[in-house]
Image: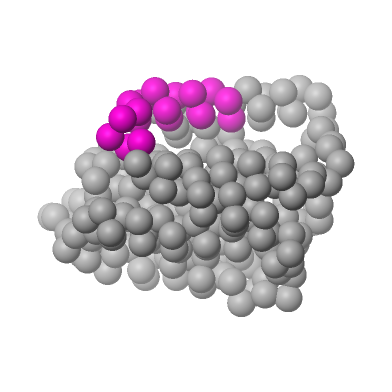
Amino acid sequence: MDLSLDLIVAIGALGGALASGFAGFAFGAASLSVWAHTLSPSLAVPLVVACSLFVQLMTLPGIWRSIDVKTALPFILGGVVGVPVGASILGVLDAGVFRTVVGIMLMVYVAAVFAAGRMPQLRDGNIISSAIIGFGGGVMGGFAGLSGILPTIWCSLMKWSKDRQRSTFQIFNLSMHTLTLIVYGLGGGLGPDLVRPLLVAVPMMIIGSAVGFAFYRRVDEVQFKRVLLVLLGFAGLTLLIR
C-alpha cells in the first residue's frame, strides 16, 4: 500500500468516525464512500468492520449509563443468527444487486419522511419484531458491515429519546461487529494486509469520534432525528454509487 492509499484510508476513517461518533452507526456508509472506489472488497469490508468496532468502543463510556440491555437483547439475539447468514451469502448473492436494493429502500424511506414533514410513529415493538429487525441487521452486517441501518430506522420509528436510540443501536452494532470479525477470522477473511490500514486509520478515528460525540452532546431530540435522516440518506446514496 503506497502513500496515496494511506491518504485514502485516512480520509475514509476520519469521515466514518465523525458519523459514527455522532450517531453510533454509519461508519460503513461514510468510509465506503471513499474506500469502495479504491480498496478491494476483501480488504474494505473487514476494514470497515474493524474500524467501526474501534469507534464503538471509544464512545461506549459516554453512553454507558443510558444502555438498557433488556431493550437491546432481542435485537442482538436476532443478529447473532443473521451475521453467519450474511457472511455465507457473500459468494452467492451479487454484491452490486444487494447494495442497489438496500440503497433504493433507504432513499425512498428518507424521501417519504421528508415529504411527510415528520417522522412516522409506531408503537413499541415486541420481542419478536425486534429480533426480526436484529436478524436483518445481522445479515447486512455479515454481508457488508452495515449492521446499524435497520435498527436505526426501527428505533427512530419508535420515537424513543436520542439517548435510548443511540444506546440501543450502538450496543447492537458493537455486538454484531465483534461477531462478524470472529466469523471472518474463522473463514480466513482476516489477513496481514489489514495491519497497515488499521495503523493509518487509528489516529484519524480517535480525532473523528471525539468530534462527532461532542456534537452529539450538543444537539436536541429534533436535531438528532434530522441528522439521522441525513445519514440514512447518505448511506443509501453511497450504496447506489458504483
Quick one: 5 or 64, which is closer to the camera?
A: 64
Quarter occupied by the N terminus: bottom left
Tell whether 20 sits left or right of 151: left
Quick one: 239 or 77, which is closer to the camera?
A: 77
Quick one: 42 or 51, which is closer to the camera?
A: 42
Please state the total of marks drawn on the protein image: 0
Q: Is residue 76 above or below residue 154?
A: below
> Which residue extends farthest left?
2
Question: Residue 178 location, x and y as percent?
Answer: 44, 63
Q: Can you tell which quarter of the image residue 105 is in?
A: top right
Residue 226 makes an appearance in the image? no
Residue at 66% in and 60% down? 73
Q: Is residue 214 above or below residue 18?
A: below
Residue at 51% in and 72% down? 58
- 32 part of magenta stretch: no
Question: Residue 211 location, x and y as percent?
Answer: 55, 65
Residue 4 makes an appearance in the image? yes
Residue at 60% in and 63% down? 171
Residue at 42% in and 41% down? 86
Quarter occupied by the C terminus: top left
Tell whether 96 sits left or right of 155: left
Question: Residue 96 location, x and y as percent?
Answer: 35, 26
**What secondary structure predominates along the stretch shown in magenta?**
helix
Q: Is residue 122 above or below residue 66?
A: above
Quick one: 191 or 184, which is closer to the camera?
A: 184
Q: Which residues are magenta?
A: 89-106
